[in-house]
Amino acid sequence: MREITKAQLTIGLLAYFATIWELLLNYSESNILGILGMAVLQLVLLLILSYVIIALLEWVKVFDLKTNAILTLFVLVTLKLLTTVNITIT
């Protein structure tokens, strides 16, 4: 497996596990299917976003792969937390 693919998968999974806690805190036993659906949807979304962001950063070739991976992790976690706060406020 290529290094960029490993980085994309790793960053996507790290961002997923870093942000899944919000979903689990709002867990209600009556809506278990909805929670599972949202968890799977969030995993797919974060994997796709990590793939796209790291691919764009590698295409531009400003930083090395490790720096791009860390930047992508920060962006994904911040984006997820901001959307969570925005949804909670409204």
Image (cartoon, rainbow, N blue to C red):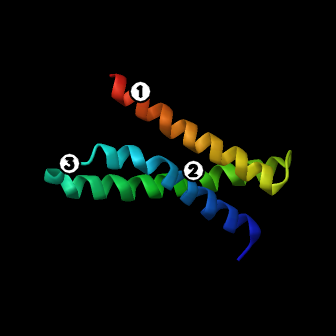
Using the rendered view, name the quadrant where residue 39 is placed. bottom left
The residue that mark 3 highlights is 28
The residue that mark 1 highlights is 86
In the structure shown, which secondary structural element does the residue marked by tag 1 occupy? Answer: helix
Q: Residue at x 80, y 56 (%)?
A: 65
In the structure shown, which secondary structural element does the residue marked by tag 2 occupy? Answer: helix
In the structure shown, which secondary structural element does the residue marked by tag 3 occupy? Answer: loop
Lateral position of residue 68 relative to residue 50, left or right: right
Could you say where residue 69 lies in the image, as x and y percent from the top left?
Answer: 72, 53
Distance from disc 1 to disc 3, alpha carbons, whole Å, reads 21 Å
Amino acid on which the number 1 mark rests in the picture: Asn
Choose the circle earlier in sequence order: 2 or 3: 3
Q: Few, some or many C-alpha atoms within 10 Å of disc 2 (few <14, some 14-19, many ≥20)?
A: some
Amino acid on which the number 3 mark rests in the picture: Ser
Could you say where residue 71 lies in the image, as x and y percent from the top left?
Answer: 71, 44
The residue that mark 2 highlights is 49
Q: Are marks 2 and 3 in contact (CB under 8 Å)?
A: no
Q: Few, some or many C-alpha atoms within 10 Å of disc 3 (few <14, some 14-19, many ≥20)?
A: few
Considering every residue shown, the one lying at the far top of the view is 90
- Which tag is nearer the camera, tag 2 or tag 3? 3
Quadrant for the N terminus, please.
Answer: bottom right
